[in-house]
Image (cartoon, grey):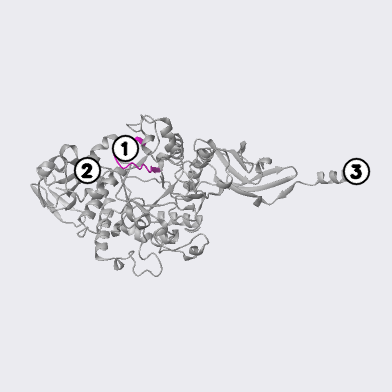
Amino acid sequence: MKILRILLLAIVGLLPARTLPAADIQKVEPPFWYVGMEDNELQVLVYGEDISSSTFSIEPYKGVEVKEVRKVDSPNYLFVYLDISNTAQPGEMTFKFTDGGATVSKRFELRPRNTKPGALGFGPEDVLYLITPDRFANGDAANDTLEMARVNRSRSGGRHGGDIKGIVDHLDYIKELGVTAIWLNPVQKNSANTYHGYAITDFYDIDPRFGTLDDYIDFVDKAHSMDLKVVMDMIFNHCGSSHWWMEDLPTKDWLNYDNTFVPTSHQKWTAVDPHAAPSEKKAFTDGWFNRGMPDLNQRNPLVSKYLIQNSMWWIETARIDGVRQDTHPYMDAEFGAKWCKATFEEYPDFNITGETWYPVGSGFPAWWQRDSKVNEFDTGLKTVMDFNLAFLVPRAFEEPNESADGRATGLFTIYVSMASDFLYKDQDNILVFLDNHDLGRFSKVTDVGLNKYKQGIAFILTTRGIPQIYYGTELLFTATKEEGDGAIRKDMPGGWAGDTRSVFTAEGRTEAENMAWNYMSRLLHWRRTSKAVTRGRMIQYAPLSQYGDCYVYARIKDDQTVLVILNGSDKDADLDMSRYSDVIKDFTRGVEVSTGEIHDITTSLHVPARGTFVMDLTK
């Protein structure tokens, strides 16, 4: 019997190693990669039951070597580091995981660099159109019936069914409006009980309720074919609590506070405060955004590399043109700088804007901009968001001007905000906006004559920086923060089958909606032709009572001058134009860009109460 057992073992030893189904490996991230990247090092996360007990190897592949195989706290992960030299060619590699006599093989594709248009960046020549995908249009009813969809339009905070196909179906509308870029709230796979997209459950996939990866790539391709750029919303500070790795985290410090829920203080001031106690800084940056959004520990080099590669993968795969990084100050600042540096080294024309949510003062966002005048540490962040301005504008175009004793109201608050621009290193790369998916709508039902609306739109499209328009602003959407986020992010009428009207056509819009849409559209199309507005310097005049409370500023580039006049009073004003001789010089006429009307600017100019002029100056 003993001899028979020995013979059987000898026979088994002579048999080839057993190849197990590749499905035993549950995750490989990234799912594929590219040859010819600036960074030759590739981190591959592999997840599978007891995968760390196996020995990793690759079948010989020219130009690719295994640098390191790192085991972590969980036995179900391996982090493989490959060196992909510039000599490596596109093709399929074979990963092998051998444990005793068993081998699991997994094919891994190396693709050629993507030659389709993309990674163009965005700048002051652009205007971003921000869309909450769930609320824009439902182009594919089939994804409404997914188990996780729970579509219910009667619930303002529920899932309504908008998707990528719905946006593609209305690209003509977006193009006709006159914007140049589309920014979508997150479309990556997300928590089942959210619609906004900020609780990501898979960084490498599109939420099936919005569509597929191919649908997203098709959307970007079609946008590019219409000369529209695409900006992707990314969230690196946190993931969703139902992310696939939450049941089995790779390391004991994959999340901040040793993978244990501790809420953030939300005191974003501490990130920039030179006097802040270290414990106060930690309470802000390391705390979880909330229980449903666990805070990623970007000081962990595995996490850092994973996130940086993820952004590269999306840029190369989908050919997006820019990124808006959510909750930017909440991230580890050194990681953020490392990510920005890596991104711009790979894609020099790219742009990243960080959500620098500081409701007061220009110094705070200025601190976060790269090469900052007020921060010795270089964050690498190219574009910041001017929330200070966004919090001023709801009242600035309604209140009377007041500047006594240093207090400012009305248009004077905007003047003071612009006067604080000395803090910024790069005034061109500041994102300016009247509202967004987190703020109350700019339009008010009381603005019957659209005076406030026209002043706000004229200002945001002619001031320094990069304008962003929130979907529906062109249609006078109204809602306050007190009414809830669902009201701010309401559906576009006509985006769903059975809607009684469609605002995507002039015939489906009300008279007031058409007035607002046409005014914005004219300015948007004109703006694309105006180098003075997109690249010119800005010169402003204080809105003082002795000058009719009018806020006047000019944008000047070479021989082009645009003059903007906003009357901040409920009374008509007759302006003595000699005050503005610095910018008017020998120009004699102003052509109002929204109407084509010609105004004499040699002596005085009559400006109606709450009136707005945006004029190209001519001789």
The picture places residue 463, in percent across and down from the top left corner, at 25, 45
* Secondary structure category for the residue under label 3: helix
At a point 41% along the width and 47% down the height, the residue shown is 321
Q: Does residue 104 appear left or right of residue 617 in this picture?
A: right
The residue that label 1 is drawn on is 426
The picture places residue 484, in percent across and down from the top left corner, at 36, 55
* Secondary structure category for the residue under label 2: helix
The residue that label 2 is drawn on is 413
| CB within 8 Å, label 3 to label 1 | no
Q: Residues under labels 2 and 1: Cα distance?
A: 21 Å
The magenta segment = 350-368
User: Does 286 appear above or below 143?
Assistant: above
The residue that label 3 is drawn on is 2
The picture places residue 338, in percent across and down from the top left corner, at 46, 35
Q: How many other residues sit within 10 Å of disc 2, few (<14), some (14-19) or many (≥20)?
A: many
The answer to whether residue 4 shows anywhere in this view is yes
> Does the stretch in magenta take in 341?
no
Q: Does residue 187 appear left or right of residue 615 in this picture?
A: right
Which image quarter: residue 334?
Answer: top left
For the residue marked with disc 3, what is the amino acid?
A: Lys
User: Does 611 appear above or below 352?
Assistant: below
For the residue marked with disc 1, what is the amino acid?
A: Asp
| CB within 8 Å, label 2 to label 1 | no
Q: Residues under labels 3 and 1: Cα distance?
A: 82 Å
* Secondary structure category for the residue under label 1: loop
Residue sitting nearer the eye, 397 or 264 = 264
User: Does 568 appear above or below 255?
Assistant: below
